[in-house]
Image: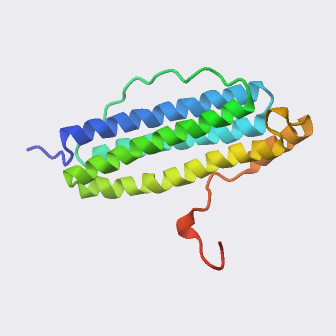
Amino acid sequence: MNTNRLSKKMQEALIKQMTKEAHASQIFLSLGVWADTEGYAGIANFLYRHSQEERNHMIKFMRYILDRGGEPEVEAIAAPPANPKTLTDCFNKVFESEVDNTYAIYKLVDLAFEEKDWATWNFMQWFVKEQIEEEKLALGLIDKLKIAGGDKATDESLFNLDKTLAQTPDDEPLPQEATADNP
């Protein structure tokens, strides 16, 4: 008896997203290593934590496929892109990676809707919300660097930015959680 509750197309799409999450983890790990070698230990730690978060997302997809009776496959992942040249380039790469992932998540939501696979559609809503948070976090990196002076920031500004990012929480408040008492 076939107990797989996922269509072949959906299972393949979920496996591709699982691989995409693994690749995102490698991208953040690579950026973290670059930041560490440049002397930005706080920024590196921030990126290492996000690398682990992306790996956790990969595991969520793996577990979901298994729980629906499917068979996840661990695919090879591409090498991360070349090291950034500057912190601006680094933070732009973070944002680009998140936006790319958001579009991939949307495609899965569309497929779930098209197939009337409401279990997968519901599962994907967590990722839709997560991507709002991730994009906001990435934009925050870009904004903080701009405030510090961008690529022309002083050593003191970069030191403070590095220290701030070492202490920055991984979660961002979302618009859905805003109230009149806590805008």
Residue 179 found in image quarter: bottom right
Find residue 60 and report its horizontal and vertical position in percent: 41, 46
Decide: is 168 above or below 103.
below
Find residue 69 and report its horizontal and vertical position in percent: 22, 45
Find residue 8 and report its horizontal and vertical position in percent: 19, 38
Q: How is the image coloured?
A: rainbow
- Judge by depth and name the residue closer to the eye, 32 or 136: 136
| 91 horizontally vs 12: left or right | right
What residue do we see at 18% from left, 45% from top? 4
Figure disc tally: 0
**Residue 106 visible from this viewpoint:** yes
The quadrant of the image that shows the N terminus is top left
What residue do we see at 80% from left, 32% from top? 151
Decide: is 39 above or below 182.
above
What residue do we see at 74% from left, 28% from top? 86
What residue do we see at 27% from left, 35% from top? 12
In this view, the residue farthest toward the bottom is 181
**Residue 163 visible from this viewpoint:** no
| 35 horizontally vs 73: left or right | right
Decide: is 179 above or below 62.
below
The quadrant of the image that shows the C terminus is bottom right
Find residue 101 and report its horizontal and vertical position in percent: 47, 40
